[in-house]
Image (spheres, rainbow, N blue to C red):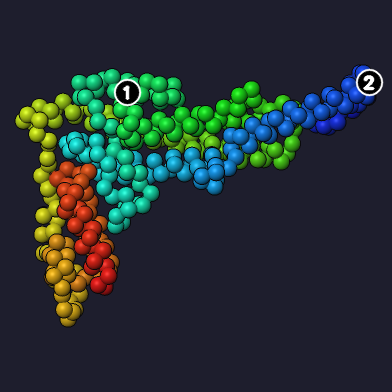
């Protein structure tokens, strides 16, 4: 009997070692089975398919977190602290030209009173630390990248909470010995790896957003002092200089073609600094350069000209 007792992974062991009647022994077996079933049901509840998305909850969160990472990396690289308004309005390039279509359209911040900057800063950091939005200091009705970050942080924390069971990131090591199963351990290890990866990426997102926000807040007083009245700060454009540089090199950069040009052809070529229809690769390279200069989130950017540039690029792409 002692040898049988050591076989803790034997699901029927309680029917053998328990004192009492047959009914009582089998009831104990059923109790153990229901306990295991309850744990599997909890996994299904947490990670089960999302009816609207057709994927599991963890994969859906992971995809959203990676999209946030891509967005923050791009937005932070083009945002100028001197162009204050760009931090508060939606990105205009969610699916334009060479930019990644999965970029989120939200601004960095929702609108707030500049006199409350210290309170805003504290509230955002506190929401991250507490993994909830109870102290969220911005307008709850307005979406922004900070709100997306904090919401994903809350959702990820909630997903890892298994109630009476150990947290997801501690599984399968923390499961009771009677749950021993090679297949279950392999499954939980895979889930844990994806969970911890998502958590690490989200932590990097928070670091990037904090660094960018701190630079903006440190510069905000200087910007207020440099403006007259309530007039918005506007930087000087460098797009014209870039176009002139391209014009200086157009003799070797363009392929002349005897094609009758429409009015839109002429307008598009002029805006992009070409005399004649360029090669596809040259067109793409010039669009990249001009788009980064005209991007409305950069100092000197202009949203109207940026959209016109995208329109011209699409048109010339069809004329190749």
Residue 96 % position (x, y): 29, 55
Q: CA distance from mark 2 to mark 1?
A: 63 Å
Does residue 251 lie above or below 105 as drawn?
Answer: below
For the C terminus, the quadrant is bottom left
Q: Are marks 2 and 1 in contact (CB under 8 Å)?
A: no
**Residue 208 found in image quarter:** top left
Q: Residue at x 46, y 29 (%)?
A: 154
Quarter placement of the N terminus: top right
Which residue does the image show at 40% across and 30% down from the upper left?
A: 150
Query: In the figure, residue 110 lies in which quadrant?
Result: top left
Could you say which disc has been placed on residue 21 in the image? Answer: 2
Q: Is residue 284 above or below residue 299?
A: below
Residue 235, relative to residue 125: is it above or below? below
Image-based side of 114 in relation to 26, left or right: left
Q: Residues within 10 Å of mark 2 (few under 14, many from 20)?
A: few
In the picture, measured across the screen, residue 213 lies left or right of residue 196, that is: left
Can you name the residue that lies furthest to the left here? 228
Horizontal side of 49 relative to 87 (left or right) equals right
Q: Is residue 21 visible?
A: yes
- Point out which mark residue 119 bears: none
**Residue 66, x across and y down, in percent:** 43, 43
Q: Is residue 293 visible?
A: no
Q: Which residue is mark 1?
A: 137
Q: Residue at x 19, y 49 (%)?
A: 303
Above or below 75: residue 292: below
């Amino acid at each position: 009997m002692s040898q049988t007792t050591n076989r803790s992974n034997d699901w029927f062991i309680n029917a053998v070692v328990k004192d009492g009647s047959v009914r009582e022994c089998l009831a104990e077996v059923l109790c153990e089975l229901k306990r295991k079933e309850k744990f599997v049901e909890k996994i299904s509840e947490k990670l089960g398919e999302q009816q609207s998305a057709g994927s599991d909850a963890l994969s859906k969160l992971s995809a959203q977190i990676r999209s946030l990472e891509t967005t923050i990396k791009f937005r932070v690289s083009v945002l100028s602290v001197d162009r204050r308004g760009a931090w508060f309005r939606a990105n205009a390039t969610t699916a334009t030209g060479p930019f990644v279509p999965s970029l989120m359209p939200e601004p960095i911040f929702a609108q707030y009173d500049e006199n409350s900057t210290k309170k805003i800063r504290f509230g955002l950091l506190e929401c991250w630390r507490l993994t909830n939005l109870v102290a969220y200091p911005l307008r709850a009705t307005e979406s922004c990248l900070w709100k997306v970050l904090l919401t994903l942080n809350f959702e990820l924390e909630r997903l890892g909470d298994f109630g009476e069971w150990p947290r997801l990131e501690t599984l399968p090591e923390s499961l009771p010995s009677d749950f021993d199963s090679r297949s279950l351990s392999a499954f939980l290890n895979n889930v844990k790896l994806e969970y911890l990866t998502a958590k690490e990426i989200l932590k990097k997102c928070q670091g990037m957003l904090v660094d960018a926000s701190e630079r903006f807040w440190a510069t905000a007083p200087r910007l207020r002092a440099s403006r007259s009245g309530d007039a918005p700060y506007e930087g000087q454009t460098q797009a014209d200089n870039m176009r002139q540089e391209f014009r200086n090199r157009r003799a070797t950069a363009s392929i002349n073609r005897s094609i009758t040009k429409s009015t839109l052809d002429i307008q598009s070529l002029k805006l992009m600094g070409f005399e004649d229809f360029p090669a596809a690769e040259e067109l793409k390279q010039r669009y990249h350069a001009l788009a980064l200069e005209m991007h409305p989130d950069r100092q000197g950017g202009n949203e109207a000209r940026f959209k016109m540039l995208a329109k011209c690029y699409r048109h010339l792409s069809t004329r190749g």
